[in-house]
Image: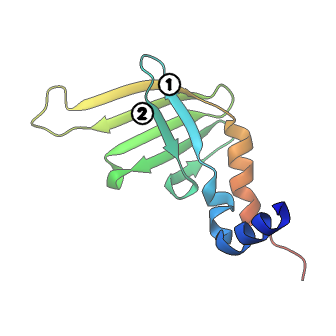
Amino acid sequence: MNSLIFSVLLLTISPSSTGPDSLPLKCQLLDTRDTFLFYRGQKVYQSDQFALFQNFKGRVVSQVDLKTGELIRTTYLGDSYKPSYQILKGRCGDVVHTLEFWALDQVPYDQ
């Protein structure tokens, strides 16, 4: 019976739902229990120390320190709000592992 269930799952689960895009980088704010999930398509830059993510057409920019997992999320609220920016701080788990997993899809395979 278990092999039948496994076979059905293999046939019904899309390969794209198990690839690098399926694993989000999970970050939690320091002062609240709010959680943010970042996906590979949101990453706009990565160096040896930082990864930058962009959301909402650049209105939200998040910086993650690869060594410490520290998150700084800056949101532009608009001129009609005072202050016009919101800055949130948090921590991300398994940052290096997640980014390395995302990079697996970029590795060319031998033919």
Q: Residue furthest front?
A: 1
Task: Work out how far the residue at label 2 is from the one at label 1, CA to CA, in angstroms.
Answer: 8 Å
In this rendering, does residue 107 appear at all? no
User: In the rendered structure, which disc, 2 or 1, sits on the residue that comes first in sequence?
Assistant: 2
**For the residues carrying marks 2 and 1, which lies nearer the camera in this image?**
1
Q: Amino acid at mark 1?
A: Gly
Query: Where does the N terminus fall, quadrant-wise?
Result: bottom right
Crowd band around label 2 with a 10 angstrom C-alpha radius: few (<14), some (14–19), many (20+): some
* Residue occupied by mark 1: 90
Q: Percent from the top left, x then y, of residue 98?
A: 69, 45
Q: Residue furthest top?
A: 31
Determine which of the numbered discs, if any, sits on residue 101 in the image: none
Quadrant assignment, res 33: top left
Tell me whether the residue at label 2 lies in contact with that at label 1, contact meaning CB atoms closer than 8 angstroms: yes
Viewer-closest of 92 and 1: 1
Residue at coordinates 39% horizontally, 50% vertically from top-left? 55
Quadrant assignment, res 110: bottom right
In this rendering, does residue 18 appear at all? yes
Residue at coordinates 50% horizontally, 25% vertically from top-left? 90
Q: Amino acid at mark 2?
A: Arg
> Element at badge 2?
strand
Residue at coordinates 22% horizontally, 38% vertically from top-left? 77
Q: Is residue 87 above or below residue 46?
A: above
Crowd band around label 1 with a 10 angstrom C-alpha radius: few (<14), some (14–19), many (20+): many
* Residue occupied by mark 2: 73
Q: Percent from the top left, x then y, of residue 67?
A: 69, 29
> Element at badge 1?
strand
Quadrant assignment, res 16: bottom right
Describe residue 81's horizontal placement relative to residue 33 as left or right: left
Q: Residue furthest right?
A: 110
